Image (tube, grey):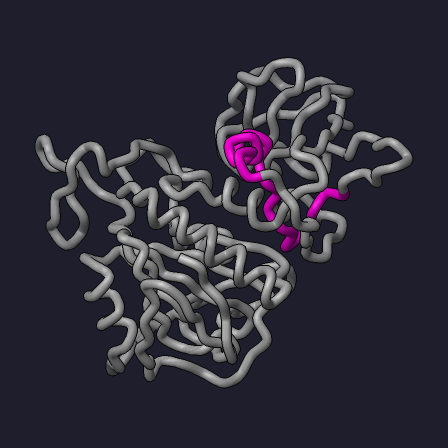
Amino acid sequence: MTLRIEKHKLVGDQVSHRDTPNRGGAMTPSYLVLHYTAGRSLESSVESLCTRKPQGNASAHLVLGRDGRIVQLAPFNIVTWHAGVSQWAGLVGLNSHSIGIEMDNAGLLKRVGSQYQAWFGKAYPEDEVLMAAHRNGGPVSPWHAYSEVQIERAIELADLLVEHYGLKDVLGHEDIAPGRKTDPGPAFPLAALKSRVLGREDDAPPRYIVTASSLNIRKGPDASFEPVAAALRKGTEVFLLEARDRWSLVEVVSNAEVEGWVSNSFIAAVAAPRSAPASPLPEAAAVEAASGRSARSAAREPAEKKARRAKKQRPAKDA
């Protein structure tokens, strides 16, 4: 299934093309954004993304099927309408700055009797369902699982696109439009994909230290979430698993069972050896750090590429 890019078009096994009318002008992509279609099938999603409607038109560069088939709807240097109202790293409106991949997946399901159903009524067997809470918040819920072939194909695509265009990061729609979008959701191993595609010079997550006398560690990235454990004391070391503009997901070094969200204002990078600079903390639009556990799960394919990082600044004042 070797893939390559020729004149901004994908070429390779199981790749086909169809032009969508839902597109904008030329662009130079900086990011890759992953989505789920929340649709019935690859074919129905392609049809929808290639249909011009009175309103609510959408599109993407690629649609990835559960069997590994790929349909390209627009060249990678042309704007498609996949991000909607969105922002990241100081950019507003990611349509003009990103390549969008829609993956055939029903998304969030609901329990109806003994079945798990999508919004369009199709039922899915338990072996295609993952029970999980979304990292942006919410209860444990059923999500449609991605196929193994689909995940492998997504990694292959991300690897190719990041390398070819020098993309800064791989994001989920849930990252650039939190609260509004939940895709690709907890069933997709986004952190593991990022670790493999973007690479790390070492697989260990960066260490940070608590600088406040007492720091709450919470269930979600906001002060409204309940604490997951007793407040962390000053000097406690934590692994940085995921960084956002004002909050970070961390794991306590001395107790791996304690994992939660803390305010960026009260942690600082642990001084690194002279041979390696300390990892800076991202700020108002920083990139997501690959989780240590996801990096370890992806260790079958050692990171060989230099990590690409978006520009980072000091976090904005904490809420």
Rendered location of residue 104, percent (x, y): 28, 56
Q: Is residue 82 left or right of residue 230?
A: left
For the record, the magenta segment spans: 280-301
Rendered location of residue 300, percent (x, y): 53, 34
Which residue shows up at 57% across the image and 70% down it? 29
Q: Residue furthest left?
A: 113
Rendered location of residue 66, percent (x, y): 28, 52
Residue 283 visible in image = no
Looking at the picture, does residue 189 appear above or below residue 316?
Answer: above
Q: Quadrant of residue 138?
A: top left
Which quarter of the image is occupied by the N terminus? bottom left
Looking at the picture, does residue 145 appear above or below residue 210?
Answer: below
Which quarter of the image is occupied by the C terminus? top right
Which is the main secondary structure of the residues drawn in magenta? loop
Rendered location of residue 118, percent (x, y): 18, 48
- Which residue is more in the foreground, 221 or 76? 76
Reply yes or no: does residue 295 show up in magenta. Answer: yes
Tally the marks. 0
Q: Is residue 60 left or right of residue 127?
A: right
- Which residue is more in the foreground, 198 or 284? 198
